[in-house]
Amino acid sequence: MKKYPFISLALILLVGIGGTASAETFRYRFANGDTYRINSTVKETVSINRVFSHNADITNRITVTVSDVQPATAILPASARHDCTFMTSERTTNRTFSWGREYSSIFRRSEFGIYDIADTYFMPIVRNVPVFPVKDVKPGDTWTGTGEEAHDFRDFYGLTKPFKVPFNVNYTYSGLVERNGKKLHLILAEYTLLYDSPLQNAATGKDYPVRTMGYSKQRIYWDNTLGMIPFYNEDFRIQLQLASGAVYEFKGTAEAVVTETKLLDRDKIVKDMNDELSRMGIENTTASSSAEGITISIENIQFEADSARLMPSEKEKITKISALLERYPDKELLVSGHTALAGSTSSRQKLSEERAGAVARFLVESGVRSEYNVYTRGFGAEKPVAPNDSEENMSRNRRVEITILEK
């Protein structure tokens, strides 16, 4: 781990700030075992060579566990290890968010917000924002810092390490504001991107970015009691100029909400759910503990023939199940579709995705969750719960599972 003497931090991060009796000291706070979830949404317009290409609606799900908290010493600030899982999903043609690519990332972050992260990790994209000055700040005070964006261009341009774009950040402390009934500190962060890529990127043999331009304007809402960011939003514009001469532009808005998470008492919840399902007379439906959380499996779920249109009886069944899901409003849902072993592999995959999407849309339309808190997955016939050797067993494999996500 790098050493960051406090005096060096002051020289690197500060534009001289004098403390006052009413000033604030901003620091990240860590506790071993802390877990939280970050949900961010991005709405952007994509253009190629100044011609509109498409609109993108993206959601990112990040889970974080904090450990190995190290207190401050004479030469090092306090810091902690962060074990994270990132999942990025773009809205599908079914109007749902399918479970996307997952990334794992491990890094240390100091109480000032500085990262220590290896080049093997591609997430998070924006690093060292915000960073805090050593001294106190009062409304109207400003300071500067350095940060970087790290992009995963392995698939597009064959770059094996994160593509890093450095920048300088200007911060302004605006003061206390009220948001969702809480008093939070509003910090404005702005940076401009203007970066010419190193020549070694040409060694990939593929087209690659030679210049990155753009800006980010962020409004960071800081909870100084918890020492964390419960909410932020952003306006951004990024242009990538490629060696071929093509120019890609991404312009839009983003926002993120941080939620502390608590472990579920799975054994008790599973038992209570199965008792409730039995009491409500919901057939072919059971709850169980799974790798991701607590899963309610609806076997022999009925759709119109060879379609993803739910039968009225199944809508009634899911409405009853919704009462159980609404007991855990801060947990996201993953809806997984499964088929029996019939038809081609591609047709089974497509049908399983469509049926998961149908159930997810029904849950959203019923108000059980926001569309940004329900994800879908299709597995085709890859995960049978019974051999596909009889109509009874095949009906069991034609199922939809709704998982209350804990991780």
Image: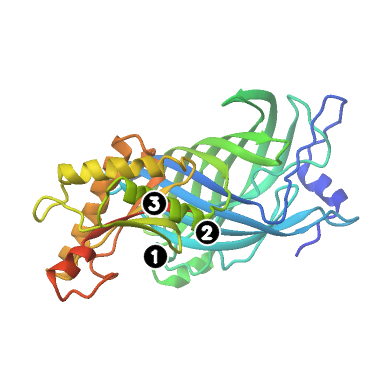
Spatial CA span between label 1 and label 2: 20 Å
What amino acid type is highlighted by mark number 3? Asp
| N-term-proximal mark, 3 vs 1 | 1
Taking depth in this image into account, of 98 and 237 the one nearest to the observer is 98
The residue identified by callout 1 is: 155
Q: Quadrant of residue 178?
A: top right
Color encoding of the figure: rainbow
Pointers 3 and 1 in contact (CB under 8 A)?
no
**Picture coordinates of residue 161, whole percent (x, y):** 53, 67
Residue occupying the far front of the picture: 279
What amino acid type is highlighted by mark number 1? Asp
Left or right, 166 with reference to 372: right
Residue occupying the far right of the picture: 74
Quadrant for the N terminus, please: bottom right
Q: Residue at x 52, y 69 (%)?
A: 200
Q: Nearer the viewer, mark 3 or mark 1?
A: 3
The residue identified by callout 3 is: 275
Q: Residue at x 16, y 52 (%)?
A: 302
Spatial CA span between label 3 and label 1: 48 Å
